[in-house]
Image (tube, helix red, strand yellow):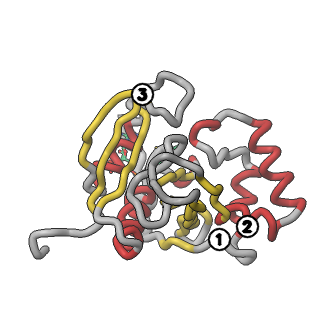
Amino acid sequence: MAKHQATSRSIVLLEPSPANLSGFEDALAKGWSPDPRRQTDRAYVEAELTTLRHDRAAFLARLTSGDVIATSVSDREPQRLVLRPFWIWDGEFCGYITFRHLPGTHLLPLHLPGHVGYSIVPWKQGRGYATQALQLLLPMAARAGFERISVICNEDNLASRRVIEKAGGRLHHAGPDPSDATDTIKLFFWLATTVRDGV
Ligand SMILES: CC(C)(COP(=O)(O)OP(=O)(O)OC[C@H]1O[C@@H](n2cnc3c(N)ncnc32)[C@H](O)[C@@H]1OP(=O)(O)O)[C@@H](O)C(=O)NCCC(=O)NCCS
């Protein structure tokens, strides 16, 4: 069977803003779920769309307001999770990638599946965009003080696994994820944020 080759272009990562929020809104209106765990949850998508249209500024603010985490991963006081969301953009909205971390530690609260979350709308998949986005995120993580970040995917999410491995991810563990109530097997990768050996 002939393999369909979608048109590939370079992407950029854009910070969500009032000027580009309509791209995200249009994707929701087409039924796209931004949460990989709720891809078929129509009610969730409708609720997100309603919330966005009710107060666009508040919706944008919510994207970057991380919860305050009271956690045993650090001996320090509870800290606010840092959320850095970006739209993946090829001239149009293609999806998002978010870098999330606690200040000053590579450890994550148990409810979070890795330092990175991403999703590409179905009509922009298969063009290398998730791979490009993950690679673009690495220097940002390095600047935030991370030599490596944790990236996780479901064992059966072959496309996401391929994205992580193409970006240099090294599998270090497979098993259930404490952040997930199901017993789905997850693959845990480390992803170096800087190229070594003088390259
Ligand atoms: C996973 C996802 C982000 C990939 O986005 P994408 O932009 O299509 O990914 P890319 O084009 O950069 O790369 C996909 C790679 O996976 C491969 N791939 C796609 N489907 C595959 C499958 N069923 N089996 C094996 N490999 C597959 C592609 O061939 C490509 O590899 P290649 O470049 O070597 O050919 C996208 O499918 C998505 O948003 N899925 C739903 C949300 C999700 O799963 N998010 C990740 C949570 S961890």
Q: Which residue is mark 3?
A: 176
Residue 109 % position (x, y): 50, 47
80 over 70 or under it: above or below = below
Secondary structure at numbered mark 3: strand
Residue 32 % position (x, y): 67, 46
The quadrant in which residue 140 appears is bottom left
Q: Which mark is residue 51?
A: none
For the C terminus, the quadrant is: bottom left
51 over 32 or under it: above or below = below
**For discs 3 and 1, the disc positioned in front in the rendered view:** 3
Mark 2 neighbour density, 10 Å: few (under 14) some (14–19) many (20 or more): some
Label 2 CB-ligand 1 distance < 8 A: no
What residue is shown at x 48% (from left), y 33% (from top)? 178
Task: Please name the amino acid that badge 2 sits on.
Answer: Leu
Q: Earlier in the sequence, mark 2 or mark 1?
A: 1
Report, in whole angstroms, how far the alpha carbon at label 3 lies from the one at label 1.
Answer: 32 Å
Q: Which residue is mark 2?
A: 60
Secondary structure at numbered mark 2: helix
Q: Which residue is mark 1?
A: 16
Check if mark 2's residue and mark 1's residue have beta carbons within 8 Å: yes
Is there any visible trace of residue 95 in the rendered image? no
What residue is shown at x 39% (from left), y 49% (from top)? 151
Question: Is residue 131 shown left or right of residue 49?
Answer: left
Secondary structure at numbered mark 1: loop
Question: Is residue 167 shown left or right of residue 119?
Answer: left
Residue 158 % position (x, y): 38, 36
